[in-house]
Image (spheres, helix red, strand yellow):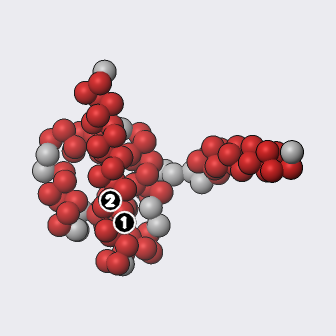
Amino acid sequence: MKVKKWLFTTIQLLRFSRMEFPIDGTNITHNLVLLQQTAWFQTLIHDEKVRQLIISDPDIRYYIGSLNRKRLEKQIHHPMYQKNIEKRIAKKQQYAIER
């Protein structure tokens, strides 16, 4: 029973953790500027559909704004961020096709 309660509490914390860290336009803009300096992000935004998704989709913008600035400035973390951003964009595009 204790495990069940702990699991429920953990899920609730993860579910509402998004509200604990407010992401504003300055975070998103700063991280987008840092991402635009990378070659993989430039090739990604050359596709007009992807560019529109990055500009208009709140979930993708929130994720970009939530990226750690210090880690984003280091090249070592870019493959991880690239994989996550591309995965989120692919999900959104798949959802748009299904609708």
Which residue is pictured at 23% across the width and 68% down the height?
37
- The amino acid at mark 2 is Lys
| Disc 1: which residue | 80
- The amino acid at mark 1 is Met
Q: Do we see residue 20 in this rendering? A: yes
Mark 1: which secondary structure? helix
Which residue is pictured at 35% across the width and 78% down the height?
76
User: How many other residues sit within 10 Å of disc 2, few (<14), some (14-19) or many (≥20)?
Assistant: few
- Asked if labels 2 and 1 touch by Cβ distance under 8 angstroms, the answer is yes
* Frontmost residue, 98 versus 72: 98
Residue 12 tag number: none
Q: Which quadrant of the figure has residue 41? A: bottom left
Mark 2: which secondary structure? helix
Q: CA distance from mark 1 to mark 2?
A: 5 Å
Asked whether, in this view, residue 78 is left or right of residue 19, the answer is left
Q: Do we see residue 29 in this rendering? A: no
Asked whether, in this view, residue 37 is left or right of residue 14, the answer is left
* Frontmost residue, 70 versus 2: 2
Residue 70: x and y in percent read 44, 75
User: On the rendered image, what quadrant is the N terminus found in?
Assistant: top right
Residue 83: x and y in percent read 32, 59
User: On the rendered image, what quadrant is the C terminus found in?
Assistant: top left
Residue 17: x and y in percent read 63, 50
Residue 83 tag number: 2
User: How many other residues sit within 10 Å of disc 1, few (<14), some (14-19) or many (≥20)?
Assistant: few
Which residue is pictured at 23% across the width and 39% down the height?
52
